[in-house]
């Protein structure tokens, strides 16, 4: 059973989670740049893989919350 | 007649009904787009790193193993004549070699056998003579290690580990 209040809380939570993942990705970009300039090439591929995984996670979370919202709109609010 | 326009209006001349608002959905999409952009940048950085990977370096004889006594060091250049390196034979006979260029501001490091460190005289930095790790002073990155192989009686440099 999904209510509009649940949807609202879920959306906020997912938003915070996505923002957190983006901050981690920013850190990964900084670490990758630092490693590139220090010629520590072994670090570069794992950071790229981790960043891609985080992006997929962010996109998945967005898809989940948007589909949740669509389901809520389809069946109408149950406050 | 008193001026009805409040003073704070001069400091904050934005009308809330004319302001641009971003919904949570838009913000989530924007953040996910940023996430994709950051992932692309990371992949680009990795591609640049892989494309510029240094080719395998040629093996070069450095010295005879008998030339290096425990507690002494030897200067050589590898892989090119412009790359000064230092080979250290520790008190227990273990042999390690590193780039002689300090990772702080590129001064030449020297071996201090008593402390078993490679010291940079410019800014009092020091590195472990076994691992090349920074121990004190301004340097934060380790010294690149020169891989050394013993081939018969010869010590041969075979590569650089950054």
Image (cartoon, grey):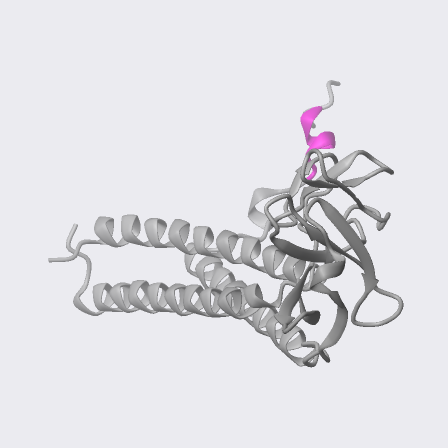
- Asked whether residue A43 is drawn in magenta, I would say no
Looking at the rendering, the stretch of residues picked out in magenta corresponds to: B7-13
Q: Choose top left, top right, bottom left or bottom right for residue B122.
A: top right
Q: How many marks?
A: 0
Residue A79 % position (x, y) = 16, 50
The residue depicted at 63 percent of the width and 69 percent of the height is B150
Q: Quadrant of the N terminus of chain A?
A: bottom left
Residue B17 % position (x, y) = 56, 47
**In-front residue for pair B2/A9:** A9
Q: Is residue A11 left or right of residue B56?
A: left
**In-front residue for pair B12/B110:** B110
* A79 w.r.t. B30: above or below: above
**In-front residue for pair A53/B33:** A53
**In-front residue for pair B99/B27:** B99
* A25 w.r.t. B57: above or below: above
Residue B133 % position (x, y) = 63, 46
Q: Choose top left, top right, bottom left or bottom right for residue B120.
A: top right
| Residue B62 seen in this snapshot | yes
- Asked whether residue B11 is drawn in magenta, I would say yes
| Residue B4 seen in this snapshot | no
* A41 w.r.t. B9: above or below: below
The residue depicted at 81 percent of the width and 46 percent of the height is B109
The residue depicted at 85 percent of the width and 37 percent of the height is B121
Q: Is residue B105 left or right of residue B24?
A: right
């Amino acid at each position: 059973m999904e209510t509009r209040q649940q949807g609202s809380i879920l959306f906020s939570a997912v938003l915070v989670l996505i923002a957190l993942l983006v901050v981690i990705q920013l850190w990964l970009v900084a670490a990758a740049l630092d490693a590139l300039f220090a010629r520590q090439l072994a670090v570069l591929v794992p950071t790229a893989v981790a960043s891609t995984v985080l992006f997929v996670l962010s996109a998945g979370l967005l898809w989940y919350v948007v589909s949740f919202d669509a389901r809520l709109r389809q069946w109408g609010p149950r406050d | 007649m008193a001026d009805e326009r409040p003073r704070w209006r001069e400091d904050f001349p934005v009308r809330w009904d004319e302001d641009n608002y971003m919904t949570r959905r838009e913000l989530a999409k924007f953040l996910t787009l940023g996430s994709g952009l950051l992932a692309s940048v990371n992949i680009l950085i990795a591609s640049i790193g892989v494309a510029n990977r240094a080719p395998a370096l040629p093996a070069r004889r450095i010295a005879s193993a008998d030339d290096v006594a425990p507690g002494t060091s030897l200067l050589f250049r590898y892989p090119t004549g412009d790359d000064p390196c230092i080979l250290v034979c520790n008190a227990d006979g273990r042999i390690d070699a590193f780039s002689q260029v300090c990772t702080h501001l590129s001064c030449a490091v020297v071996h201090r056998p008593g402390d078993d460190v490679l010291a940079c005289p410019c800014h009092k930095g020091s590195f472990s003579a076994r691992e090349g790790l920074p121990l004190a002073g301004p340097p934060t990155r380790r010294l690149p290690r020169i891989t050394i192989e013993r081939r018969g009686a010869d010590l041969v440099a075979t590569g650089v580990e950054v």
